[in-house]
Image (cartoon, rainbow, N blue to C red):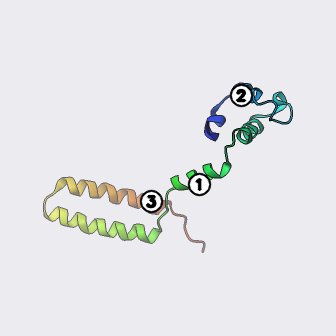
Amino acid sequence: MEKRDLEKMTITKLRDEALKYKDQISGTIHEMEKDQLVHALMNVLGIHEEEHAIAAKKKAKIKRSKESLKQEMRARRKDQDEARKSNDAVKVSRLRKRIKTLKRKIRKYPRAAA
């Protein structure tokens, strides 16, 4: 069982699970709130918070700078011109869509404070 499994459980299921370990959990189980029960069960089951934080960091996307996005867009435009010269409509269409997504990403960047 992992932390996310405990967090998905309802409060009644958490209480039932905590009652199995009532001798190891301090305090009254029925008076605890959900987050308190989750932490108590994590301590009893030996689940560590750090493992989940590391896994979450691995899933985080790497943000690219605005300038690198602009450089990629310029390169795609050159490729698009070459594809137009070679009459490759499929490649032109794919590059057009990629340029469009890059433009959107650039627009989402916050403006520098003046």
Residue at 62% across, 39% down? 2
Closer-to-camera residue (32/63): 32
Residue type at mark 3? Lys
Residue 25 placement, left or right of 2: right
Extreme right residue here? 27
Distance (Cα) linking label 1 and label 2? 26 Å
Quarter in which the C terminus is drawn: bottom right
Say the numbered circle drawn on residue 105: 3
* Residue 104 picture location, percent across and down: 43, 58
Q: Nearer the viewer, residue 51 or 76?
A: 51
Helix, strand, or loop for circle 3?
A: helix
Residue type at mark 1 is Ile
> Which residue is at the front of the view, 100 or 27?
27
Mark 3 or mark 2, whichever is nearer to me: 2
Measuring from the top left, give residue 107's x and y in whole percent: 47, 61
Above or below, 23 relative to 103: above
Instruction: Please give the label number shown on residue 54.
Output: 1
What percent of the width, then of the height, locates residue 96?
A: 29, 57
For disc 3, the neighbor class at 10 Å (few under 14, some 14 to 19, many from 20) is some
Q: Nearer the viewer, mark 1 or mark 3?
A: 1
Residue 101 image position (x, y, % from top left): 38, 56
> For residue 17, which numbered disc appears in the image?
2
Q: Earlier in the sequence, mark 1 or mark 3?
A: 1
* Residue at (66% x, 35% y) in the render: 6
